[in-house]
Amino acid sequence: MNRLTDLLGTALPLIQAPMAGVQGAALALAAGRAGALGSLPCAMLAPEAMRQELQRLAASGLPHNVNFFCHAPPTPDAAREAAWRAALAPYHAEIGLDPATIAAGPGRLPFGAAAAEVLEAFRPRVVSFHFGLPAPELLARVKAWGAVVLASATTVDEARWLEANGADAVIAQGLEAGGHRGHFLSDDLTRQSGTFALLPQVKAAVRVPVIAAGGIADAAGVRAAMALGADGVQVGTAYLCSDEATTSALHRAALQSEAARHTQLTTLFTGRPARGIVNRAMRELGALNPAAPAFPLATAAIAPLRAHWEAQGRGDFTPLWSGQNASGCLSASAAAITAALAEGFSPGL
C-alpha cells in the first residue's frame, strides 16, 4: 500500500492502461479482480455503448478508471484533405475503390457534456484524460462527485500544467509507450523523452503522485520504475494478448512476432502521433506524413484500405499499436499477467 493505492482504492499501485478499440469492460474487470485498477477506454464509444459498459463495471463494486480523450476538434482543411487523398489514391486504385465514395468525418470525439451526463449517473472513482484536461466546467463537474482525476504528461512542463489545473495524479508517459502520445502543450516530439528519463524529472517537479508508463512489460520494469521514485505504474501492451482483450488475431500475431521489435510513431491512421508496429503503410507513405489531416480526421480515408487488407488477413494498413517492449505480451489471463507484474512491487526480489 502507498499513497497511490490509497487514492485509487486498489490493492496494487498498478493501472491497466485504457486501450481504445482493443478492449471493453471485460479486461478492466479481470485486471480489477486481480488487484489492479482496471480501465475502460471511452474515446470510441457512443453514449449508449458507454452506459452498458459502465453498468458492468458498476455492478462489480470494484474501483475502476474511465478514460476519455479531450483534444480540441480540428477545423476541416479542404486542401490538406485533398493532399491526403492524393497520397492514398494509388492504394485506393489498387483495390478498385472510388475515393468519392469515402465519407469524411471524425472517428473519436472529445469528452463533452453528453459523455459527462452518462458518466455522472455512475460516478466512477477514477476518471482519466489524454491530451490534457477538459474545459474547466467539465472538469469541475467530474470532481464534484469526488472522482480522482488522472492525466497523461509527456514532458515536465505538461506535468506541472496538469497539477496546476486540477489533476490528482500524473501519468508520466515515456516515448516507448504504445498508442497515442498524450502531448498537449507542444507538438514537438523532440521535447519528449523515454520513461526512465522523464519519470525522475516529473517526480521532482510535482507534488501529486506520479505513475510511470511506457516500456514497462514485466516485473523487472515495474521494479525499475518504483526504484526511480514512481508511485505506481500503468501498463498497456502486456495486456494486448490477454484472454479478455478484444485484440484481433492479426494484431495478436504481429505482437508475438519479430515484427514487434520495430515500432515507430505514426500519424497515418488518425492524424496524431501514435506508436505501432511498422507495416506497409508506414514504410511506403512515411510514418509521419505531413499530408495526414489533423486528429482524428485522417482516419476516414485510410479506413477502407484497412478493411480491405484485413479481409485478406494482412495488416498492411492496420494500426498495430504497440509499445517498444512487447516481450511481455503473452497469451494468458489478465489475472496471470497482473500477478506477474505485481511481483515487481515485492521488496527484495
Image (cartoon, rainbow, N blue to C red):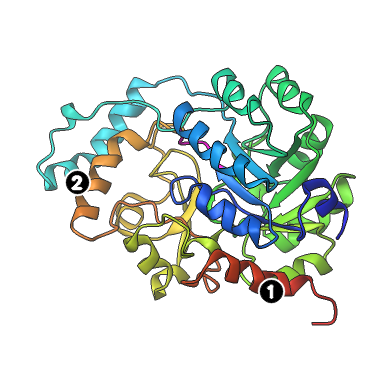
Principal secondary structure, stretch drawn in magenta: loop
Residue at label 1?
219
In the image, residue 219 lies in the stretch drawn in magenta: no
The magenta region covers 41-46
Q: Residue at x 29, y 41 (%)?
A: 303
The kind of secondary structure element at disc 1 is: helix
Viewer-proximal residue among 241 and 260? 241
Nearest to the eye among marks 1 and 2: give it: 1
Q: Position of residue 158 (x, y in %)?
A: 74, 39
Q: Residue at x 58, y 35 (%)?
A: 68
Quarter of the image with the N terminus in it? bottom right
- In the drawing, does residue 170 fall left or right of residue 29? right
Mark 1 and mark 2: Cα distance apart in space: 43 Å
- In the drawing, does residue 322 fall left or right of residue 97? right
Quarter of the image with the C terminus in it? bottom right
The kind of residue tagged 1 is Ala
